[in-house]
Amino acid sequence: MTLKHTFKTALTGLKTHKARSALTILGIVIGIAAIIMVMSVGQGAQDLILNQVRGLGSRTIIIEPGREPKGPSGFASILGDSLKDRELEAIKKKSNVAGLADVAPIVIVRGASGVVYQGETYQAMIIGASDLVPKILEIYPKEGVFFSDEDIKQRASVVVIGSEVKKKLFGPSDALGQKIKIKNMNFRIVGVLPVKGQVSMFNADELVIVPYTTAQQYLLGTNYYNAIIVQAESEEAISRTVRDIELTLRELHNITDPEKDDFHVTTQADIADRVSAITDIFSILLVSVAAISLLVGGIGIMNIMLVSVTERTREIGLRKAIGATESDIMRQFLFEAIILTAIGGIIGVLLGAFFSFAASLVLSRIVSIVWAFVFPVSAAVLGIGVAGLVGLVFGLYPARQASLKSPIEALRYE
């Protein structure tokens, strides 16, 4: 029997039991579709985060207190107080950090119950920053102005709010000149940011920015910074600037062993590499979970094929009686299993692509930024290939069982 005839016979067998064939491939369809969705959404998330990270500028360097976190227990070290005015002034000196262009200290106001306007409360992220933040983060006010260096020196009670904060508290009304409360202290709104979305470690739309001196004295009662953002003069100067910052801080803190640093310096390239590594690990874990569906689907195919062999015992006996060999019978049933899984793989890829596209549209609406649809071609090719392999592996035993049946016993089967 030729391969062409065997293939046609296998198709005829599958068409005879359409409902059973459809249910058989369901596990494969679900498994492949899940893998496509996970990899597509995961890649979309990675691209989104990396674009936001790169949006801060390739020349940006972030200095944070505490040792660099190496695991879950290491995150406690980032809450240290090793960055103060002394460190800020030392970093600003060209004699210490020759490649520095701009520097902006950041304090995060934790423990605030939100911002309040006429009884309405909005849980925003409140930070204290310098007047250089708009230049470094590229978030210039759409309405009004950013506070000035003079406001910082005078510890003025002025604030710049994000677009979402303005929308929730003021709606279509003008927010400029209005006063909001932060920790029972009145702040006058001098600027409103445009719709920007995620910018580095902040969601600009939900941001409330006050002068860092005001935040330190009146909102926190502290004298240290949660981060210092530095911008190098050029991309070529980044590595030299990082080295100068590390040497300057180690000299200030009398540190001779880099392993004992009470600060850590991160560049945009470092952040991008970490984001890629984290998202890749999560994608692998999720794909591994989705792949279980393929295993379940393969076992289901083997069970259905064994049932099919039993139901078609007389057919097998008749075909053997008129000259079909064991290899002919084995190929027929093996082809049936491979065809089922291949069809399941193709349907799974199409459904996975459709649902991934739909998910990208929904996520774009939810997060209010463009979530790009990414079709993972490698996952589609791998999925169809794995589906065919599953059919081959799990169809082999039932096909072998069918081929070994005695034609005489098979014809007697009731």
Image (spheres, rainbow, N blue to C red):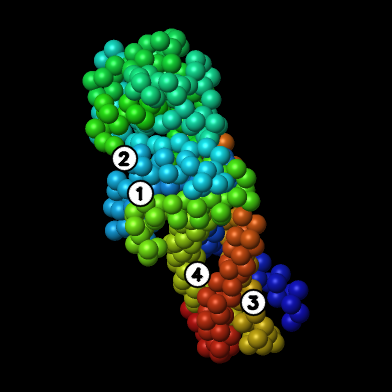
Extreme-front residue of the structure: 95
> Secondary structure under badge 4?
helix
Mark 4 → mark 3, Cα distance in angstroms: 18 Å
Residue indicated by mark 1: 65
- Badge 2 local density, few (<14 within 10 Å), some, or many (20+)? many
Whether residues under marks 3 and 1 lie with C-beta atoms below 8 angstroms apart, the answer is: no
Q: Position of residue 230 (x, y in %)?
A: 49, 42
Q: In this rendering, which labeled residue sits more in front, label 4 or label 1?
A: 1
- Badge 4 local density, few (<14 within 10 Å), some, or many (20+)? many
> Secondary structure under badge 3?
helix
Q: Earlier in the sequence, mark 4 or mark 3?
A: 4
Label 3 amino acid? Gln
Q: Earlier in the sequence, mark 2 or mark 3?
A: 2
Residue indicated by mark 2: 224
Label 4 amino acid? Gly
> Secondary structure under badge 1?
strand
What mark, if any, has residue 298 been given in the picture?
A: 4
Q: Is residue 192 above or below residue 33?
A: above
Mark 2 → mark 1, Cα distance in angstroms: 9 Å
Residue indicated by mark 3: 332
**Which of the two residues, 89 or 33, is positioned nearer the viewer here?**
89
Q: Earlier in the sequence, mark 3 or mark 1?
A: 1
Q: Is residue 158 above or below residue 270?
A: above
On the question of residue 82 being in view, the answer is: yes
